[in-house]
């Protein structure tokens, strides 16, 4: 097998549980993300078996593949009943310290964004003294036309992710749920929009948001969540899922030359095949979108999550696993995700446009196409 110079070999097997090197199921769900630091892949997330108060776990792998992830332990312990940390991502600052950014504060139970830092990748991590992070009321609030309305039209943080640009600047993109949209006064001209999307710049040390200039983009985001930013060939991609709770949903993207926009019209990511063996629709290959990751040589991987604990009616078979990872083929800068039950990241030809028949994916919410 010939492995490209910047791509790591690793076998991925979908539709089964992901196990660590000790043979235990990986406890890095709830929007856990992947990061490559100094040639090693890191996977961080919260124990998905615990709906409230799950601890934050860290794993690492040199080969990316199934069965190669070593458990580093709990990086942050959650108080019982605290808001669970979701959509966490681990990054290394150019100055050498490590930063974890995610939605929800494990210890205090506050809504908003939590930031933790450590001198070593496996901790110990401490919560950054972040006066601008706190509850969502501490960050700017807006009406749906974009002008500031202090103390009104509160927007709670939804699913999001940390993004680090080529120049070393860091940003958090998040879906923000308008808590007051259903009661917007008639005749005010305020759009009754249930969500917006915000992109917020962090300080140079990545331990807090910039105080007065944090927001670089604000716009409508109707029925979208699980926001993820990435950059390919000098183009920014804003990707997201539909607001379908824990069920499989379509995946969307927009593009821009600058984070501040303007952003293109929204389009759906293509999935091949879109039907399983009995002809049922399997939205996003039977998952909720989580991320697009460059695995080396500008070759990309799609990642999605499943939620058998949160919604056992939709996911009656937990042995089908909580995570899927698929190869992405780019057609004129448009991503298409091809189904593979088993594939190797190192040897895969990312121009391959053939697809295996889609495995049967359990889930009563998978719709029969009309």
Image (cartoon, rainbow, N blue to C red):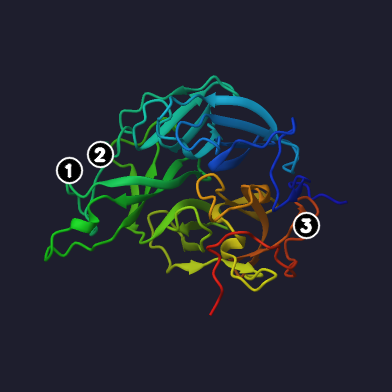
Instruction: Tell me which numbered mark, 1 or 3, is placed earlier along the sequence.
Output: 1
Q: Is residue 360 left or right of residue 87?
A: right
Q: Residue at x 40, y 34 (%)?
A: 83
State the residue position of label 1: 151
**Visible residue check, residue 299:** no
Q: In front of the other: label 1 or label 3?
A: 1
**Visible residue check, residue 103:** yes
Tag 2 near tag 1, CB within 8 Å: yes
Could you tell me residue 301's position as x and y percent? 65, 54
Could you tell me residue 230's position as x and y percent? 53, 52
> Where 124 sits versus 172, above or below?
above
Could you tell me residue 178's position as x and y percent? 28, 52
State the residue position of label 2: 137
Cα distance in 3D space between marks 1 and 3: 52 Å
Q: Residues within 10 Å of mark 2 (few under 14, many from 20)?
A: some
Instruction: Tell me which numbered mark, 2 or 1, is placed earlier along the sequence.
Output: 2
């Amino acid at each position: 097998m010939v492995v490209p110079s910047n791509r790591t070999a690793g076998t991925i097997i979908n539709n089964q549980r992901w196990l660590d090197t000790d043979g235990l199921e990986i406890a890095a769900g709830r929007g856990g993300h992947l990061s490559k630091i100094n040639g090693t892949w890191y996977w961080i997330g919260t124990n998905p078996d615990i709906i409230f108060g799950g601890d934050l776990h860290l794993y690492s792998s040199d080969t990316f593949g199934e069965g190669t992830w070593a458990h580093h332990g709990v990086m942050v312990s959650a108080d019982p009943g605290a808001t669970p940390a979701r959509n966490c991502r681990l990054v290394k600052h150019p100055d050498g310290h490590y930063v974890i950014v995610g939605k929800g504060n494990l210890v205090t139970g506050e809504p908003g964004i939590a930031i933790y830092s450590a001198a070593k990748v496996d901790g110990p991590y401490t919560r950054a003294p972040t006066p601008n992070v706190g509850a969502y009321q501490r960050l700017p609030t807006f009406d749906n036309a974009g002008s500031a309305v202090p103390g009104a039209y509160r927007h709670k943080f939804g699913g999001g992710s940390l993004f680090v640009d080529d120049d070393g600047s860091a940003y958090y993109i998040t879906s923000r749920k308008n808590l007051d949209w259903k009661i917007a006064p008639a005749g005010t001209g305020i759009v009754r929009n249930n969500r917006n999307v915000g992109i917020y710049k962090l300080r140079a040390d990545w331990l807090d948001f910039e105080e007065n200039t944090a927001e670089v983009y604000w716009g409508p985001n109707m029925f979208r969540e699980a926001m993820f930013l990435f950059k390919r060939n000098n183009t920014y991609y804003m990707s997201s899922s539909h607001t379908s709770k824990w069920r499989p949903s379509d995946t969307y993207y927009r593009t821009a030359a600058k984070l501040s926009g303007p952003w293109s019209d929204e389009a759906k990511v293509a999935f091949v095949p879109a039907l399983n063996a009995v002809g049922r629709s399997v939205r996003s290959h039977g998952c909720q979108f989580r991320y697009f990751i460059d695995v080396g040589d500008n070759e990309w991987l799609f990642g999605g999550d499943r939620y058998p604990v949160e919604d056992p009616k939709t996911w009656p078979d937990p042995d089908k696993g909580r995570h899927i990872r698929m190869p992405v083929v780019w057609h004129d800068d448009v991503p298409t995700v091809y189904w593979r039950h088993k594939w190797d990241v190192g040897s895969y030809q990312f121009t391959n446009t053939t697809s295996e028949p889609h495995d049967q994916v359990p889930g009563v919410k998978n719709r029969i196409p009309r």
